Amino acid sequence: MKDYIEKRVMEIANFIINEGATVRQTARLFGVSKSTVHKDVTERLPKINPLIANQVKSILDINKAERHIRGGRATKMKYKTDTM
């Protein structure tokens, strides 16, 4: 694996751990696609640092469990502002 990829993977992992960020937020900040972030944290990170990979996985699992709530709030806010 190339050095710049390893560096990006570790930066992404640290950002997700420190901020509790979603894949979309991380992708937007780092200027890469959601697919790249997902591949970095699910395939590349466990090879580089399995301990950090487990921490990231637990955060992403929480985000995945909560996404339907965030989506509902976003929809509610959308229609709340449209009707006013």
Image (cartoon, helix red, strand yellow):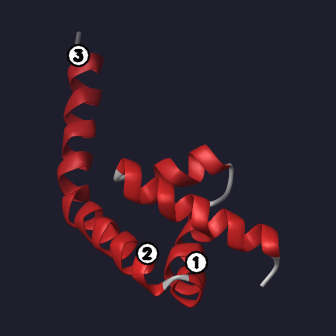
Q: Is residue 22 visible?
A: no
In this rendered view, identify the residue nearer to me: 5 or 61.
5
- Secondary structure under badge 3? loop
Who comes first in sequence, dot 2 or dot 3? 2
Up-down relation of residue 81 to residue 13 (above or below): above
Amino acid tagged 1: Lys
Secondary element type, mark 2: helix
The crowd level at tag 2 (other Cα within 10 Å; few <14, some 14-19, many 20+) is: some
Q: Which residue is mark 1?
A: 39
Q: Residue 75, image x and y in percent?
A: 25, 38
Whether residue 9 sits left or right of residue 55 in the image: it is right
Judged by depth in the image, the label closer to the viewer, 1 or 2, is 2
SS at mark 1? helix
State the CA–CA distance, disc 1 to disc 3: 40 Å
The mark found on residue 52 in the picture is 2
Give the percent coordinates (x, y) of residue 16.
43, 57
Q: Amino acid at mark 3?
A: Thr
Mark toward the start of the polypeptide (1 vs 2): 1
**Which residue occupies 64% across, 50% down?**
30
Give the spatial CA distance, label 2 vs label 3. Answer: 45 Å
**Placement of the N terminus among the 4 image quadrants:** bottom right
Q: Is residue 38 visible?
A: yes
Residue at (48, 48) in percent of width and height: 25
Determine which residue is flagged by label 3.
83
User: What residue sits 27% from the left and 18% below the top?
Assistant: 81
* Amino acid type at image mark 2: Ile
Whether 70 is drawn above or below 11: the answer is: above
Q: Residue at x 58, y 46 (%)?
A: 28
Question: Do callouts 1 and 3 mark residues in contact (Cβ within 8 Å)?
Answer: no
